[in-house]
Amino acid sequence: MSILITPTEPETDHVDAAQRVEPASARPGESTPRRRRRAADTGRDHASRGFWFGVWRGAGAVLLAALILISAAVTVVPLIIGAVPLTVLTGSMQPTIRPGDVVVSAPVQAAQLSVGDVVTFQPISDDPTLITHRIRSMSAGDSGVRLITRGDANSADDPEISADQVRGRVLYTVPYVGWVTNLVGGNVRGPLITLAGLGLVGYAVFTLVRRPRGATERNTP
């Protein structure tokens, strides 16, 4: 009669095997110093990227707002009130108005003019050339209201003109925009600038009134 004996492994071998397979430091819910350092570095990277993304996003919003305001001032507002935007080419009105500035000039009646107003006028009747200078003095006679004008940077008055030669009184000035508009051809400048201004204003209105997608889902408990 023979007895079959099956060898068994010591208990310590099972413990060692278990320790080799799943070290105590890798138990669920725990992390090694290396993992903690990696997580901290990743968090700093995300924070840095988030900060610069916020900076660029804020700068883009400011730039867009500035473009919208400029476009509205040069195109939309004149269109609404019947004014005309004009680019200043000379420095005769410095420092009040500089070359490259855009002046928005609206039609005005002779009775509404006064000394000190900056007006746009035709120095020669029926000549399309326009000048924007300040009224220095006014007089009324049998031929109507007569005006003496002068550029702020000039030392001599302009030749006398009649109130009928005035095409408008300057309402406001938009600095430097004229340099940009002058880069566009004269035949397409007006329509192109108007379309660009209306497009920017429309985009701003759309951005303000639109509702972000998923807002209902996120706000609903």
Image (cartoon, rainbow, N blue to C red):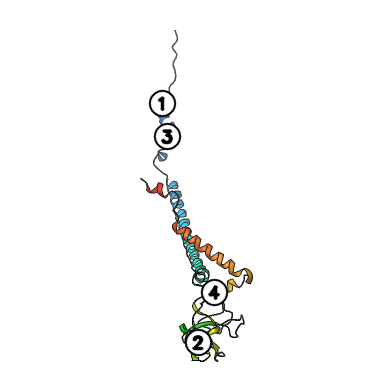
Report the residue marked by disc 2: 135
Picture disc at residue 85: 4
Q: 10 Å neighbourhood of mark 1: few (<14), some, or many (≥20)?
A: few
The amino acid at mark 2 is: Ile
Picture disc at residue 19: 3
Quadrant in the picture for the N terminus: top left
Residue 217, position in %: x, y?
A: 41, 46
At mark 1, the secondary structure is loop
The first of marks 1 and 2 along the sequence is 1
Farthest top residue?
1
The first of marks 3 and 4 along the sequence is 3
Quadrant in the picture for the C terminus: top left
Depicted 118 relative to depicted 200: above or below: below
- 104 displayed left or right of 215: right
The first of marks 3 and 1 along the sequence is 1
Evaluate if marks 3 and 1 touch, with contact meaning CB atoms under 8 Å apart. Answer: no
Depicted 51 relative to depicted 133: above or below: above
The first of marks 2 and 4 along the sequence is 4
At mark 4, the secondary structure is strand
